[in-house]
């Protein structure tokens, strides 16, 4: 029993009640549906499960979904940190407006975003026509998928990094400068370390969202098997054939891969906390 | 959460119906849910208004028909999973067979209404850009170098299955019945497809709004509607030498109407489809009427003569064609597993 106490005694009562509620709620909202997913998968025998998750089409979709999501999340980390920096460190006209625009990808229904992006990036679209003279097509290629994922993932990085930058004690930077640290050292040794956990969180959120994204991607992806077909679409196909166990199997594999990647990110986070001591 | 058109439609219908039921409880009103496929929005909007008038004249009660549209695969799944459809109106028999298999519709529904429960038909034609710059005349022109073909995914779209089967039937006939040649032809055709949308309306948008592709394999009704909306100056319809008769099927969802007590109105809704007024509505919305003699001859001019094969005679019916061509590991899947 003693193990389930606060790490440090707290003066706020109600541990039993709140902890009980937390466990109950997480089970209801998260664990039960996911457990159902895995149980459904077990309706398949091993041979059919193996056939589903080793087929060339499944593997191609897996590579595409996770590859595009990783690249999109990495890109969002670079751009997102830059945008957060600009929004926090500089004061300029319409800063609040720009700040509000960041949230638009959250607010827009994903299908609307997908249709809008598609009509912009097709060869005759506003942006697509700038590229089509050079033989570059964006819509209906993996690049188009990547763009949709960049679009929906951007707010995650900005919104996780922004508050950390706002709370950042600038006197530490100044102290580093007065102690004679070159700018590069200041950035690498003073500014970057406290940002790492927030950046990693933003990355994981953007990545996780991108892997499961359907609505915005489906319009700009070509949906050609083994070329531009994403994993969630394969799940939809199986659902429409009412092959629920097969659909669950694909989802379970997706979830497991995502879980492994997110776990790795968490371990990096633990390491960085130890390394830079902001646990 | 998937983007779910059905939920949107239901929510919108409920929102629209709520003020009526709340403020005017004295008026007698019936409701009916018609679950249909992608391109029939305009058709059932007009038909529902017509049916409301007929029903009012007959019973003194108004009826609010909620029409739900989407790729037929998703719509079938919605009904199987509990969308309370009173009637279903789908582009092919295989769709309703799926609902029958789930136990919601009694076997033998095909003979419940005249003409094997098929009140109107359509076919597959080509829509090309003005002046037909790629010179497309028939199916074999679709696999010429540099021709891009737009068609939805047969896994999710009923219309796309007709596109696929029409192409197959064309090559089968041309090669004198060689199934391997037909398969190679269809495989080559799909190599010319840059994007597979999930439904017919999505493909039309890709071709018309986003200006992708040289030829759209389209429902005849969808092609004629595009011409009407965008003017004849932008697109042309090409009728191939051979196409497929798309036999639209309708059925009452027995289990749902018995639970809700709506069998009478559901049956009336489908029977009314066979009246001259309804046949005129079909022709106006570019569907081929069952009884052309009941329709203004001027409207029949839209429907060009074309040799039409049926899925029954060439493919042995939907119960056979569906798993063979479009099922998991079927011929369509094999087409994409070769390099």
Image (cartoon, coloured by chain):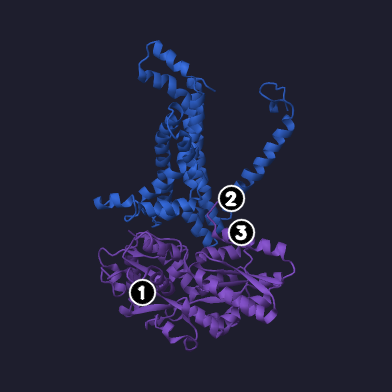
Display colour for chain B: purple
Other-residue count near label 3 (Cα within 10 Å), few / some / many at <14 / 14–19 / ≥20: few
Q: Nearer the viewer, residue A189 or B320?
A: A189
Tell me the mark number nearer the camera, choosing from 2 and 3: 3
Q: Residue at x 50, y 73 (%)?
A: B92
> Foreground mark, 2 or 1?
2
| Residue wearing tag 3 | B11
Q: Position of residue A151 (x, y in %)?
A: 43, 44
- Do discs 2 and 3 share a chain? no
Q: Residue furthest bottom?
A: B293
Measured Cα–Cα span from mark 2 to mark 3: 27 Å
Question: Residue B336: x percent and y percent?
Answer: 37, 60
* Residue A168 location (% of width, % of height): 49, 22
The earlier-in-sequence mark between 1 and 3 is 3
Which of the two residues, B176 or A6, is positioned nearer the viewer here? A6
Q: CA distance from mark 2 to mark 1?
A: 40 Å
Residue B159 occupies quadrant? bottom left
Residue positioned 74% across, 30% down in the render = A14
Rendered hue of chain A is blue
């Amino acid at each position: 029993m003693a193990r389930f106490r606060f790490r440090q005694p707290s003066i706020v009562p109600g541990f039993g009640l709140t902890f009980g509620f937390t466990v109950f709620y997480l089970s209801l909202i998260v664990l039960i549906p996911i457990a159902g997913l895995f149980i459904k998968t077990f309706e398949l025998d091993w041979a059919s499960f193996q056939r589903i998750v080793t087929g060339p089409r499944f593997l191609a979709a897996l590579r595409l979904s996770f590859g595009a999501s990783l690249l999109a999340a990495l890109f969002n980390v670079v751009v997102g940190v830059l945008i957060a920096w600009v929004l926090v460190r500089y004061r300029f006209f319409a800063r609040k407006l720009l700040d509000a625009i960041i949230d638009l990808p959250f607010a827009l229904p994903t299908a609307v975003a997908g249709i809008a992006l598609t009509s912009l990036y097709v060869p005759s679209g506003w942006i697509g026509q700038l590229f089509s003279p050079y033989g570059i097509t964006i819509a209906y290629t993996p690049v188009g998928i990547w763009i949709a994922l960049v679009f929906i993932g951007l707010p995650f990085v900005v919104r996780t990094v922004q508050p950390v930058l706002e709370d950042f004690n600038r006197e530490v930077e100044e102290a580093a400068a007065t102690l004679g640290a070159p700018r590069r050292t200041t950035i690498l040794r003073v500014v970057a370390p406290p940002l790492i956990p927030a950046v990693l969180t933003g990355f994981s959120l953007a990545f996780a969202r991108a892997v499961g994204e359907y609505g915005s991607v489906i319009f700009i992806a070509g949906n050609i098997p083994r070329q531009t077909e994403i994993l969630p679409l394969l799940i939809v196909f199986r659902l429409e054939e009412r092959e629920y166990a097969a659909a669950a199997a694909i989802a379970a594999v997706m979830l497991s891969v995502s879980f492994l990647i997110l776990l790795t990110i968490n371990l990096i986070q633990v390491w960085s906390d130890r390394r830079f001591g902001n646990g | 959460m998937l983007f779910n058109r059905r939920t949107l439609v239901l929510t919108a219908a409920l929102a629209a119906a709520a003020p009526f039921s709340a403020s005017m409880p004295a008026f007698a009103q019936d409701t009916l849910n018609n679950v249909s496929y992608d391109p029939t929005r305009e058709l059932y909007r007009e038909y529902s208004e017509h049916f409301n008038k007929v029903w009012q004249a007959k019973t003194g009660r108004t009826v609010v028909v909620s029409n739900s549209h989407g790729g037929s695969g998703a719509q079938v799944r919605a009904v199987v999973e509990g969308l309370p459809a009173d009637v279903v109106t789908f582009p092919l028999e295989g769709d309703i067979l799926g609902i029958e298999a789930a136990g919601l519709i009694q076997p033998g529904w095909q003979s419940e209404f005249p003409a094997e429960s098929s009140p109107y038909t359509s076919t597959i034609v080509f829509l090309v850009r003005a002046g037909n710059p790629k010179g497309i005349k028939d199916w074999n022109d679709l696999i010429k170098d540099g021709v891009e073909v737009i068609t939805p995914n047969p896994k999710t779209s009923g219309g796309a299955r007709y596109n696929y089967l029409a192409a197959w039937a064309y090559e089968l006939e041309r090669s004198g019945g060689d199934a391997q040649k037909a398969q190679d032809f269809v495989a080559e055709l799909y190599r010319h497809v840059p994007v597979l949308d999930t439904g017919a309306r999505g493909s039309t948008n890709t071709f018309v709004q986003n200006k992708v592709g040289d030829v759209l394999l389209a429902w005849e009704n969808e092609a004629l509607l595009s011409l009407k909306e965008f003017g004849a100056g932008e697109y042309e319809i090409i009728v191939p030498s051979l196409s497929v008769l798309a036999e639209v099927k309708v059925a009452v969802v027995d289990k749902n109407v018995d639970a809700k007590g709506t069998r009478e109105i559901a049956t009336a809704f489908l029977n009314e489809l066979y009246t001259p007024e309804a046949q005129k509505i079909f022709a106006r919305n570019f569907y081929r009427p069952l009884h052309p003699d009941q329709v203004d001859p001027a409207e029949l001019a839209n429907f060009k003569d074309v040799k039409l094969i049926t899925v029954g005679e060439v493919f042995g019916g939907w119960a056979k064609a569906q798993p063979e061509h479009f099922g998991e590991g079927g011929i369509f899947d094999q087409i994409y597993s070769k390099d």
